[in-house]
Amino acid sequence: MTPAPDATGRPGLCSTYCRVLREPLAGTAVVARGWVVVEQPGPWGAKAPTQSHLDAEFGGPFDDQCKKVDVRFGLIRSPGRHADTVERSHQVFVASTTPGRTWLLGGQVVDPSELGELDLEAVAHGDRAAVIASLPGLSPVDEPVVLVCTNGKRDGCCAVLGRPLVSGLAARAPGRVWEANHLGGHRFAPTATYLPAGTMHGHLTVETAAEVLHAADRGETVLTGLRGRSTWTKRGQAAEIAVRELTGELALDALRVVAEDLETVSVQHLDGRSWIVPVSSAVADPPRPDSCGKEPFAMSILQTGTPVSGAVG
């Protein structure tokens, strides 16, 4: 059953389509080996790095530099109301998501443009010492943090569904929950990223979001609503989740995506076991919008077959 259009005759909330059509979440996370986020209070436009109180002459080029090395750049805000013109420092988080080189750094900068000194290549390669050397104000953060997309200028679902999630989760985990400007996958709202692992979840409630955070504290993840770990390609994300569903493995760093070809993805466990996972794409039926206000279209979705145990060559 397809959701009815809204009062304007346009498609309704994209997240409603996603839920009603039971669109699979696996393999829909963004792809990034590292993350750099900086606190920027005040309003955000649809393209926040250049449409906010962040200096656009810094934000745009820095965002481009991050993309070139497979690092995700974003803006964050603390939950609740806050003054957006007061002189203040800005919280920064830098994360490496690669298993075996997973870490989170935090600190504050007087001006976000100080991030221009950050060694982005080191972030992408998980070289924590080099990152700290490039921006000495950073130091290790022991507890995972949660970024929840709330930017209504980017997509209505993120504001309508994301902001209540932030409020509820922040009450349970003070200081560890942040509003984020854009995490991709509006139709999976409310959606969140857990750093440093870079795991992304969709269709969250306060209860399930808290469950995922508790699991992250243990070095684990939760399969419900798991979209993928940003370290891997989208096909790799889907394959890793398929293996987790088959084996029940929840430890974040137990699995690695080690190879891909046109039809399969190879996933390896730290204990030496390995699986070959068939991964293909199919046209979604019926068509659906990928963002609020857009017309439905026949998008592609990933499908995985049953993982087969075997040697990874």
Image (tube, rainbow, N blue to C red):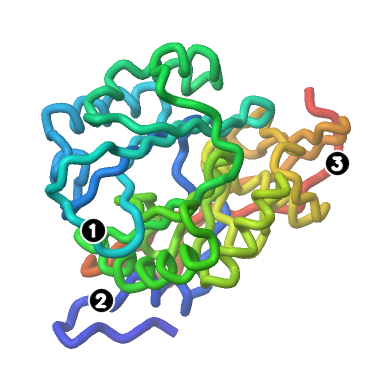
Residue marked by disc 3:
309
Q: Label 2 is placed on what type of residue?
A: Pro
Q: Earlier in the sequence, mark 1 or mark 3?
A: 1
Q: Nearer the viewer, residue 224 or 194?
A: 194
Q: Is residue 236 left or right of residue 38?
A: right
Q: For residue 287, what is the image quadrant?
A: bottom left
Tell me where residue 294 appears, x and y as whole percent.
Answer: 23, 66
| Residue 225 as seen in the image, left or right of residue 287 | right
**Residue 212 picture location, percent across and down:** 62, 59
**SS for tag 1?**
loop
Check disc 1 and report the residue beneath it: 82
Q: Amino acid at mark 1?
A: His
- The reply to whether discs 3 and 2 touch (Cβ–Cβ < 8 Å) is no
Which residue type carries mark 3? Ser
Q: Secondary structure at mark 3?
A: strand
Q: Residues within 10 Å of mark 3 (few under 14, many from 20)?
A: some
Question: Observer-nearest residue: 43 or 232?
Answer: 43
